[in-house]
Image (spheres, rainbow, N blue to C red):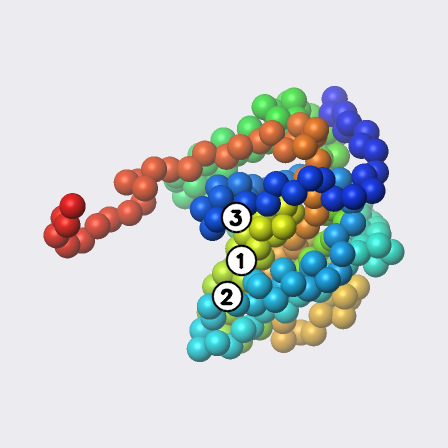
Amino acid sequence: MHHTPATAPAAAPPAATAPVTVEDALRSRRSTRAFLPTPVPRSTVERLLGLAARSASNSNCQPWRVHVVTGAAKHALTAALLRAHADDDGRGRDYDYQPGQDGWPEPFRSRRRRFGESLYRDTLGIRADDIGARLCHHRRNYDFFGAPVGIVLTTSRHPQQSALVDAGLFLQALMLAARGDGLDTCPEASLIDFSPVLRRHLLIPDDQVIVCGLALGYADPAHRLNLLRTPREPVGAFATFHGDETE
Ligand SMILES: Cc1cc2nc3c(=O)[nH]c(=O)nc-3n(C[C@H](O)[C@H](O)[C@H](O)COP(=O)(O)O)c2cc1C
């Protein structure tokens, strides 16, 4: 059984633990899945978006767009997504971010299984066969894990592949910029399972591909979901150096 610790609403942002170096931002960014209700001022969100827009893009096309939802607008979007999830209605994705089981060759299949085990079994204490508890956690995606700010990232449909790369750069820049303000994030592909719902609700035009969602806010340091740490392969496992050894 998964219990969510009650969290008292905090009036002011937690004491700033803002990293000051790019290295700190990279090392401290992690997918945060429980947030304090502490609001994030609109001016802060605008500044972070402006920083993310410094990202490189194909010939400076800047194909990204964002929809920012807070307050009543966020509640309404969450309600629409939860309804669609409950009714299994309005499913559909603009691009194939999550292929089915057969779409994952090794070593990705094993890495995905290990990640699922660390999230559900080790962090939440949910057994593999406890579908109800797994669904209960999954539904929290649609509330942006309690974050006060929900972002839906879209990008140009043409040329789709380069626009998706550029949107990925924007997403990473936004997550790192957030660290600079002591804020945390969780990218959310789960939202795009219901892209027609997002499109209708946020009036997203057809020339835009819905890339993913992003939760933005102050991490709840007391929540066990935020204890999850993910490993990385060593550089030697993915980098090939060509040329002379210089040192
Ligand atoms: C585009 C994208 C979509 C993601 N979608 C989800 C999601 O829907 N729900 C979730 O809990 N985590 C999601 N994640 C988070 C990944 O599980 C996470 O990045 C990965 O396990 C590595 O952990 P870290 O971000 O804490 O370093 C997503 C990550 C990316 C890059």
Q: CA distance from mark 1 to mark 3?
A: 15 Å
Residue 105 location, quadrant? top left
Viewer-side label of 1, 3: 3
Judging depth in this view, the residue of 162 and 230 nearest the camera is 230
Residue at 52%, 67% in the rendered image: 54
Label 2 sits on a secondary structure element that is: loop
Residue 154 location, quadrant? bottom right
Q: Amino acid at mark 1?
A: Ala
Q: CA distance from mark 1 to mark 2?
A: 7 Å
Q: Is mark 1 within 8 Å of ligand 1?
A: no
Look at the picture and state if 233 lies above or below 151.
above
Across and down, in percent, residue 30 comes to: 56, 41
Would residue 64 be seen by someone viewing this image from the given angle?
Answer: yes
Label 3 sits on a secondary structure element that is: loop
Q: Which mark is residue 173?
A: 1
Neighbourhood count class around disc 2 (C-alpha, 10 Å): few under 14, some 14–19, many 20 upward: some
Residue occupied by mark 2:
55
Q: CA distance from mark 2 to mark 3?
A: 19 Å
Marked residue nearer the N-terminal end (1 or 2): 2
Residue occupied by mark 3:
20
Mark 2 touches mark 3? (CB < 8 Å) = no
Label 1 sits on a secondary structure element that is: helix
Across and down, in percent, residue 207 comes to: 63, 75
Mark 1 touches mark 3? (CB < 8 Å) = no
Judging depth in this view, the residue of 59 and 162 nearest the camera is 59
Mark 1 touches mark 2? (CB < 8 Å) = yes
Q: Is mark 2 within 8 Å of ligand 1?
A: no
